[in-house]
Amino acid sequence: MSHPLSTQMIFERGERLFGDSRIITFDGTKTAATTYRQVADRARRLANALSALGLRPGEVLGTYSWNTQAHLEAYLAVPAMGCVLHTLNVRLSASHLEFVIGHADDRILLVDASLVEALQSVLPALPGVEHIIVNGASPDTISGFSGSVHNYEALIAGHKPVGTFPQLRETDAAAVCYTSGTTGLPKGVVYSHRSVYLHSLASMAADCFAISNRDRILMVPPMFHANAWGMPFSGWLAGSDMILPGRFLQPDNLAGIIAAERPTLMAAVPTILNDLLQVHARSPIDLSSFRTIVSGGSAVSPTLIERVKIAWGVDVVQGWGMTETSPMCVLSFPPRGAQGEDSLQWRAKSGRPVPGMHVRIVDDADRPLPEDGETTGHLQLKGPWVSGGYFRETPDVSPLTADGWLRTGDVGRIDRLGFVQVTDRAKDLIKSGGEWISSVELENGIAALNGVIEAAVIPIPDPRWEERPLAMVVLDHTTRPEPAVLRAQLLGKFARYMIPEYWAVVENLPRTSVGKIDKKQLRQKFDGGDLNVLIESGFSPGDRT
Amino acid sequence: MSHPLSTQMIFERGERLFGDSRIITFDGTKTAATTYRQVADRARRLANALSALGLRPGEVLGTYSWNTQAHLEAYLAVPAMGCVLHTLNVRLSASHLEFVIGHADDRILLVDASLVEALQSVLPALPGVEHIIVNGASPDTISGFSGSVHNYEALIAGHKPVGTFPQLRETDAAAVCYTSGTTGLPKGVVYSHRSVYLHSLASMAADCFAISNRDRILMVPPMFHANAWGMPFSGWLAGSDMILPGRFLQPDNLAGIIAAERPTLMAAVPTILNDLLQVHARSPIDLSSFRTIVSGGSAVSPTLIERVKIAWGVDVVQGWGMTETSPMCVLSFPPRGAQGEDSLQWRAKSGRPVPGMHVRIVDDADRPLPEDGETTGHLQLKGPWVSGGYFRETPDVSPLTADGWLRTGDVGRIDRLGFVQVTDRAKDLIKSGGEWISSVELENGIAALNGVIEAAVIPIPDPRWEERPLAMVVLDHTTRPEPAVLRAQLLGKFARYMIPEYWAVVENLPRTSVGKIDKKQLRQKFDGGDLNVLIESGFSPGDRT
């Protein structure tokens, strides 16, 4: 008797066993709680309401929402009823937004009231959209939109909870998330029911996120990107309390929520942790309720890990993954017995594959390279929740090698114990005088210097060396060290040819829609002459180290 | 791109990431350690050796072994090479042993040297067996056996490690375990690659066994029964150290191993824990290295849980499952926030379904009953690793209902939070004057009385009440309370009609081949007049409570 893996198992487990667990929402001022029992009942009403609006199994519903309870209810209802949850990135440009809604063929959109205005401009170009469900204060009509506008609360109040969900195949699509499209048009990564279930179960493993019934998860990663690291699903499967900050992700708001709700777990990009550290430096905040903070999305510097440990005694576990891996792939849990300095050494690596995942490095011809901790190559992935194709694309648009490995576009090393160290996006490597320089390693080295809050490094053209690194730094306002001083401190830590002579002091670093440092924008700023670049001479890249 | 779930993922993960983890073997005197790296290399040699002996994908290899390193190597090699691991229960009667080897068509047997003699008598009736591989001091020939005898060490030393394992389907059989056959002939429960993988991954979940790289697992449940609760697979997947006690499961041996190796986790039937408590009472031993002890296989009394907590400060987590469920099904983790007395109350229940498993209670016509904590019914299971058929049986020999639920033969209740309380095997219920009496609840109540070490209750015929409970007790030799005293202590804890008037004081309780109290044998003893039964009058079952 086959028993298909599905998100229905997730929905029904949380509903049946953990009815008293809590879903907590922050409204910008205070938190309010409801129970799994209530949320499950509302999700079942939503399913019936969506059926009444004409949503059929296999069809797509688009969400355009922050981390809200209604969004969570859509996570539960839409896949369980056999439909596909399409989470729209609220930071997409209008042209990408229009493309993605049209490509996915979203006939129904669930939209936060605060985001209706942002959506409005693209609606005239999207005649396929028939219904817009507004979560919050809903207008009667939306200018330029000829379909029906519904109020979320009124809609679900008008329907009974659905009794039984349809039988699904585990390979059916449960959700789709378009990649942020740093090159070309966005592509839709498809998550099957099987892959969501396996990712969620692996997230509960003791050496992974170890998500349990005892956890209180602060849902910081946006639910419109890679399913918020899968935590709405894995948290519900485990019966964790979940705290939803809505659109209030500013560090002061997060600090307030943490003080009020004492969460035990969150995932966050390094920027969020840097922001919280800056709040803490101004006026101490308490993050000691966290048993673990998982960080990733861009490289997590050892300095950041150390600063969090010093500030609050909390271990940061670094992760590396992709939209195509749901996103969990490797996590930097120290090996058995590692402690203290040794532990930091491991935590500073990108991590080891979580159960089910395989990682390898290959040369330009996809031939495996030695995993000796020294050889650098293209990182490729394989595993039961690696997405192998894109939504509504022909199979020739596959990111996989002939033997089934996913090309990540990242470059790195793998050591004897299987620890992966991502050194760069292939396109972020700097080729200087025939030698490769890793921008990530430089960024980590510079961020560790006294007086530096954050650093980013991009390649810029150089008449002599072809390319050279440009270091952009955000400095502590009290000390403000000179670039010459910073540069001198890098001596002995890096080969001389790696140490940047081009520096720019900036007030902040621009972010992408998912909170990573936006290197494309930095390159554009540099190209447009918008950066005040200093050239430190002192010593030359060509000097012997 | 489909990525089949398989034991190969388990093998390769442990080998690749946890090469330094340890496999520790007890030889009756001392422990000795080797590494995952070594064991994986030996397993790869074994795979090549078995191929050379003619074992082809899909064929079966029988093991007749205690918990040894060679047995673990067979666990790793046999399924990974696409063959089926058939673990023979070393306590089977000769007739069942002969039946099972013949039914499974074992052409190759891997046998502990200490068990060759026990096997010898059945070999003449099994002409299909061609090769016997002896682990330990091997004879040149085995009397009555005309096939080849091999020494395990010599055999694997003569072969290179296999490089690549064949591609498998996840529905392929990985292992088979014949149920101990309390009624009728043994039947082979099949574990597919998919089910072994999913059971192993779920075993790593924080709210399940939480098996991790930091664990040191003392492998107490026999590897010939339900894959030792799956721990050879889940432990290897997690990279835990594993301590193999061989055939030395006597309490003094276990106490010595625990002192030497400081394990963090074990699963054990209640008998083993009772035995260790008795050793402790004579001369204190230290079990504080355990973070958790999982117990099951037969009902775990609250008294036992409490005694272990008092003796060593260790929490016992109760489990309930079957050979057909690999065996993990429900585990008694307290709900969020439960502490102290409240915590014991939850731990004394059979438990809540682990992720993936579903449990229901039904009436005699398979109709679902209310899950209100009070209604009693037949327990039925469903989940991705529930075995739905038996090895080499036609599908009509299915233990499943028409809608796919496994009939367990157990009876119990389910409460609002999904906690299952198994009250009895259907055939162990006692029908007294039209009322049901649970033998398990009585056993727990009697075992909790001062001076009682263990208790078993069976139904016996009674001229007035049709059936009455007979209580058999093992008493503490220092206090030896009279049955009348024990009986009086049950007043107020049980309805009067439930309290046994038939008592027998025994020196010990007989066990089945998997360590459960052998009620069949107790019934036979009673029927044969081999028990000295006292009748306590004092009050009558018919008195009002």
Image (spheres, coloured by chain):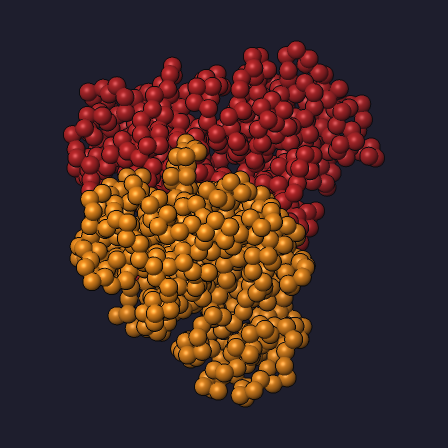
Chain colours: A orange, B red
Residue A57 screen position, x and y as percent: 48, 73
Q: Nearer the viewer, residue B401 or A178?
A: A178
Which image quadrant for residue B230?
top left
Is A339 above or below relative to B329? above
Residue visible at 53% across and 88% down in the picture: A144
Which image quadrant for residue B17?
top left
Q: Nearer the viewer, residue B219 or B90?
A: B219
Residue visible at 51% across and 78% down in the picture: A119
Which image quadrant for residue B425?
top right
Q: Is residue A225 left or right of residue A469?
A: right
User: Quadrant of the image for the N terminus of chain B?
Assistant: bottom left
Residue visible at 50% across and 48% down in the picture: A293
Q: Residue furthest right?
A: B544
Is A124 above or below relative to B296? below
Q: Is residue A170 visible?
A: no
Q: Nearer the viewer, residue B531 or B351?
A: B351
